Image (cartoon, coloured by chain):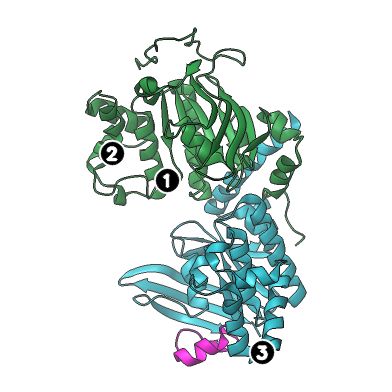
Amino acid sequence: MSLLSVSGLTIRSGDTKLVDDVSFTVGPGDRVGLIGESGSGKSLTALAVTGLLPPGLTATGEVRLDGVDMIGAPERQRTAVRGPVAAIVFQEPLTALNPLMRAGRQIAEPLRRIRGLRGPALRSAVNEALREVLLDDTERIARSYPHQLSGGQRQRVAIAMAIACRPRLLVADEPTTALDVTVQAEILDLLDRLATAHGTALVFITHDLPVAARVVRDTHVMRNGRIVESGPIGALIDHPGHPYTRTLVDSARRFDAALERTARD
Amino acid sequence: MTDTPTSPSTPPAAATGGAPAGAVPLVAADGVGFSYRGGTPALTDVSLAVHAGRNVALVGESGAGKSTLLRLLLGLARPTTGTITFAGAPLTRGRLRDYRRTVQAVFQDPYSSLDPRHKIGRIVAEPLRGLGLGADPARVTEALDAVGLPADTASRYPHEFSGGQRQRIAIARAIVGHPKVLLADEPVSALDLTTRVRIVDLLASLGAERDLTIMLVSHDLGVVAELCEHTAVLEHGRLVEQGDTSQVLGRPSHPYTRRLLASVPRLSAQPPA
């Protein structure tokens, strides 16, 4: 059975369709990309999958996460799958982090609530979570408030929170877009390694095709709320079928080619 | 198209268009250092020249000192040590007006850099008023046309435009007074990939058609390779490497430059299926 199945998902704001008849599935350990530019509906799809759509938007169709109906089920059932089944990492880690709470306490919160850890066991689980995202100096990081950390450290803390309860699916929405390029490479490696180590399925959302190519296996290209093309990412890059996919590939190749020219000159 | 820089009072032969290295640079930082009050130096001994016709890239990551150097080059702050020169002579307060005619800027965020209360026509004309040229609608129309926007754009408001269109408007504002140098601070990093390509194409064509030299601040090495002839790499406030882009990015000699290059995501490096 699929871990996540989305079928005919449509999201409306009033009469406007923001996401239009989107269907895809994610099995255990899969790496699925949702690629699209501003307004393509990719982030709303991610929010719908995790049951976090903002009020004012209405979703129809079906989203099943580990069997739970993420559109129709009562809030309590939807909350129950967030954390142990699926977790989300956002572009801007400050979205997920409470500015008034030390990083250690924020990571401890899901460990306490979902895994029921207390006292020394909780403390060592927090340290373990920080080491897992390759933050050494765990004591200092745990005591820090978000504003005392760099952008890369914050995103690592947000990832540590997301994976603390070993979700089977991690949804990452542009997790590296706000970061410097060397930090971006480190975070992509980290996500890659963690997903492999724990068999976590990944839904990776980005506008940046080369970034997706680094972590994703299968991908769906979205435009104006619809999926216009799907397939293994290597095949899409080598043989884009839809004109929009071709434009994306050509755009990325422009800058690739410019860099390769410098190496040849 | 009349705008040669009005010759400043003490210039060595400045107006040699398309000059190679060795000629007098349009704008230069000469051994520049800068410390924020009481802080550690943000810049140390930075020398960098912008020559007519050779686009310059300033590459580095958060906290490297790129924005500080840009502030100095815009005349918004004065270096603690060293000098900023304009057409071969130190940039003094008295020369700032001339300088502003010659050097204009575009910033990263096309959403916050345009005043939402004003019509585009007024926004684009702003540098003209500052330069005492008057808000000539013909110049505004010409600048909008140069960035590929129709004349009726002038009567609309910023919120009516997409990110890429707003960045075009910001570029129109920067070029309306026919500057010689455009300082572009991460002008495409907030834009989608397909929009990025179009804005880079626009910058390249403006450079060719308007005798405009671009100094690009960016961490996107693909954009740098596409647009700039000269590249300078800034790390912790120091220039660790600079030279021809093909040299610096093609055969990087500094470990930091190599690390930046290795971090660039590329289509050619796909994971196994």
Residue type at tag 3: Gly
Residue A77 is a magenta residue: yes
To the question of a shared chain for discs 2 and 3, the answer is no
Chain assignment, label 2 = B
For marks 3 and 1, give the CA distance.
Answer: 52 Å
- Image point (74%, 77%), residue name: A198
Q: In the structure shown, which secondary structural element does the residue marked by tag 1 occupy? A: helix
To the question of a shared chain for discs 3 and 1, the answer is no
- In the figure, the cyan chain has which letter? A
Front-most of residues A37 and B82: B82
Quadrant containing the C terminus of chain B is bottom right
Residue under label 3: A119
Magenta stretch, residue numbers: A65-83
Label annotation for residue B123: 2
To the question of a shared chain for discs 2 and 1, the answer is yes
Binning the other alpha carbons within 10 Å of mark 1 as few (below 14), some (14 to 19) or many (20 upward) gives many
Residue under label 1: B164
Residue farthest toward the front in the current orientation of the protein: B38
Chain assignment, label 1 = B
Residue type at tag 2: Ile
Whether residue B263 is situated above or below residue B199 in the rendered picture = below
Front-most of residues B188 and B107: B107
Whether residue A79 is situated above or below residue A243 in the rendered picture = below
